[in-house]
Amino acid sequence: MGARKGWQMSDEQQKYNPKIAVFGCGGWGKNIVRTMNKLGYLAAVIDPSESGRSTASELVPEVPIFSDATEVLANEEIDAVMIATPAETHFDVAKNAILAGKDVYVEKPMTIDIGEAKALVELAESENRILMVGHLLEYHPAICKIEEMIQSGELGTVQYIVSNRLNLGKLRTEENVLWSFAPHDISVILRLMNAYPTNVVATGGTFLTPGIADTTLTQLAFEGGARAHVFVSWLHPFKEQKLVVVGDKKMITFCDMTKELVLHDQHVDWQDGQPVPVKGDGVRVEFSDEMPLDIECQHFADCVANQTQARTDGRNGLRVLTILHDAQRSLDANGEIVTCKLGDKKEVTHAAS
């Protein structure tokens, strides 16, 4: 098994491949199962449902499959557990895994309740265990390239970010579109801004299921005047997944549908006290064609092998979850401004990339 491009593996890591179990083989879990097996780390699959176990047996017939986690968590040869079960089960499953001495990856959102999320973070730290949250887009090569360009100063100071995630379909009746779609965009915005917002405003519309918003628009305000806007909807006539980052030197756009990352040498100059747009041709920026899930899963295995902090660690997941709750409060209050607060400065600092 080779390392991904540009990823330097230590000699110790090359000698040690951790054994990892995946809990959940449903809609997204089956992709994790398939990927971890491809990478050579899959040691077991756990799924309480007959359909999940059937899917696992078809995907990885050579891998042991269990209906509950008891035997797996008791197995000292299992180093870590990846959790892709329904969000309401995340806390109990992750807690039990950490207490069993396993490193843990949990799909987003890490929990539904903020108190439970904080408890997981504190438990992982007290038990000296890795806790990683599956914010997939933070591993997307295009997003990593944008982050690199921001850090190098090529875009200048980021003034605002717009992220649209639109589609017709994937209708839910148990969670609204804010919780279903927006975690992706919020996690990316926090990564690119490398800051925590001062306040949030969210508005939306409910058209299909009472109490379940089908479309929401969320605005995040940051110190210094920077803004970010997240527009998500599953009642849209066409599919769009587009990110726009505007700096005071240059702008960059990423369309996840066409896989195009375009740098726009456009900005605004001032002449005689008047703003004048300076336009330039867009230039495509190349980025790796590696699959984000491959990168994310490999990163977790690397963290387990080397006992290093994850790029999207528990505190990262807690930041996103807290903003989601603040946005929901604003949504429930018809767009009232909600002040964003975090009690621990450690929760604001990104893990090393």
Image: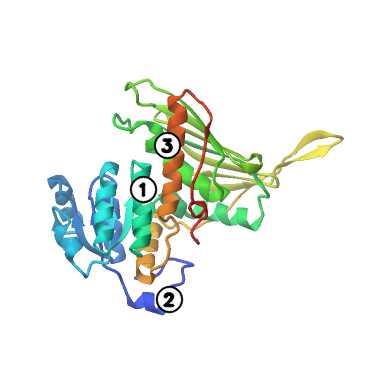
Q: From the viewer's perspective, is 40 left or right of 9? A: left
Residue 326 location, x and y as percent? 46, 35
Identity of the residue drawn at 37% across and 74% down: 13
Residue type at mark 3: give it. His
Identity of the residue drawn at 66% across and 55% down: 153
Residue 347 versus residue 181 in the image, above or below: below
Kind of element beneath mark 2: loop
Residue 256 versus residue 210 in the image, above or below: below
Q: Which residue is mark 3?
A: 325
Identity of the residue drawn at 33% across and 46% down: 116
Residue type at mark 2: give it. Ser
**Which comes sooner in the sequence, label 2 or label 3?**
2
Residue 324 location, x and y as percent? 43, 38
Residue 203, visible in the rendered structure? yes
Of badges 2 and 1, nearer the viewer stands 1
What whole-number distance in Å separates the C-alpha atoms at marks 2 and 3? 40 Å
Q: Which residue is mark 1?
A: 117
What whole-number distance in Å separates the C-alpha atoms at marks 2 and 1? 32 Å
Residue type at mark 1: give it. Ala
Of badges 2 and 3, nearer the viewer stands 3
Label disc, if present, on residue 10 of the rendered structure = 2
**Which comes sooner in the sequence, label 2 or label 1?**
2
Kind of element beneath mark 3: helix
Residue 28 location, x and y as percent? 29, 47
Name which quarter of the figure residue 131 lies in: bottom left
